[in-house]
Amino acid sequence: MYCITDEQVAYILNDIRRNGIEMEDLQLNLLDHICCKVEQEFKENDDFERFYKQVVKQMCNSHLSEIEEETINLLKFKNYHVMKKAMMISGGVSTVLFLFGCFFKLMHWPGASVLLVLGIVLMSLVFLPLAVLLMGKEPSNTTQDRIVLSTGTITGILYAMAVLFTIMHWPGSSVLWFSTVGVSMLVFIPFYFFTGIRRPEKKIKTVFTTVLFIGATGLIFTMMRVRKPVPVQMYTYINNEQLLKTVQRNAPAPQSDLAVKINNICEQLKAIVLQQEIGMPAIPANYEALQISINENQMGSFFYDNKAAADLLGKLRGAVSTYNGEVSETSRIPISHTVIDAGGDNNSLFTNLSLLNTLTQIQMHVAMAKPVQMAVVNK
């Protein structure tokens, strides 16, 4: 075992103090720990200073002062380690959930909405508050730094909630967007700018970052004011739905069991598509005020690999085939080159809006059937 000298002990103690360790008890504890390490592992012919630096690197990431900051946090903040661990776990889990949610949304797979909601809520309501709480407890932060952290976190939470409400088409998204822009432009950015500009070493970084913040906030405001155009096919579907309701109100009664079955299956299929696209089973009357829009996309695996949708599509094909076999040729429902054509070459060529319009047209054909034709179906 190596016997440490008084000169080496003095060198270690001076270096501990030079690195910003001000607590006397902590200085002595670190000195004792390092001396024990030297006596157990140091060899006579080794370079003492090099060995000492290696020991210090094992104890902290960069500077010994980190140990004192950690100690102060533990003394003042009893649940510091628990909250730090919770912050890291929530941050990792929320990131994974959000990325998978985005991927599922892109691929039109079921479960995308659940993943996005869980990821955004976990990040905004757990990770961000814990992060600002822990960072605000660091001794190096001033009161102004804590205000900047708090306002920045509030802005981040509002932004995440605004994105979530927009994705899920929940009411209140516009209020959240305006709140995000207002807090960012009137509170966070001014505090950040005037706090950093007073420090010469941070002046250039503060100006550069402030310009980026203002630009990002301006882009958000611009996107809020630009109404996304609704695809023409969506307008066609909405008009067809209005026409269908008129036809059904004036349709001859009673309808056959087969006609009712076809109508119910069409409604269920439309609900599946709309639930995936806009998060609700039907387009509300105030869709323009809610800024609801359906992007025309090819029918993906979310529909064709969905057992419920596949079963309903199979039942609809059978019901329409039976219907066409029992009515006159002029009254048959046209299905050629549509998504319900079982003999179609490639179902992936059809879009969500083409399917919705096709289903509505089938319902109109059935609703407009004349009493004579309905009697044929009922025989």
Image (spheres, rainbow, N blue to C red):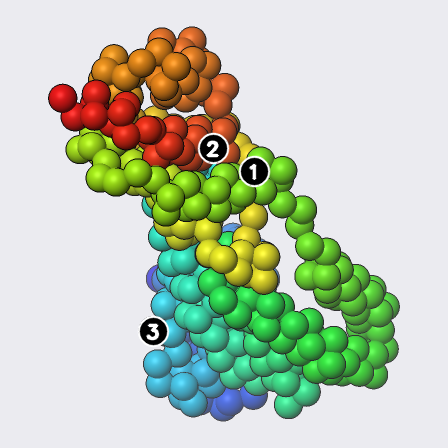
Position of residue 76 measured from the top left corner of the image (x, y, whole percent): 43, 89
Q: In the rendered view, would you say 178 is above or below 221?
A: below
Nearer to the camera, 364 or 281: 364
Left/right placement of residue 234 relative to residue 320 reads: right
Left/right placement of residue 221 relative to residue 374 reads: right
Neighbours of disc 3 within 10 Å: few (<14), some (14-19), many (20+): few
Q: Are marks 2 and 1 in contact (CB under 8 Å)?
A: yes
Q: Quadrant of the N terminus?
A: bottom left
Select label 2 or label 3 by which is in front.
Answer: 2
Which is nearer the N-term, disc 1 or disc 3? 3
Q: CA distance from mark 2 to mark 3?
A: 55 Å
Q: Are marks 1 and 3 in contact (CB under 8 Å)?
A: no
- The residue labelled by disc 1 is 236
- The residue labelled by disc 3 is 82
Circle 3: element type: helix
Nearer to the camera, 235 or 377: 377
Left/right placement of residue 26 relative to residue 266 reads: right
Left/right placement of residue 254 relative to residue 201 reads: left
- The residue labelled by disc 2 is 357
Position of residue 34 measured from the top left corner of the image (x, y, whole percent): 45, 70
Residue 203 visible in the current orientation: yes
The picture quadrant where one finds residue 379 is top left
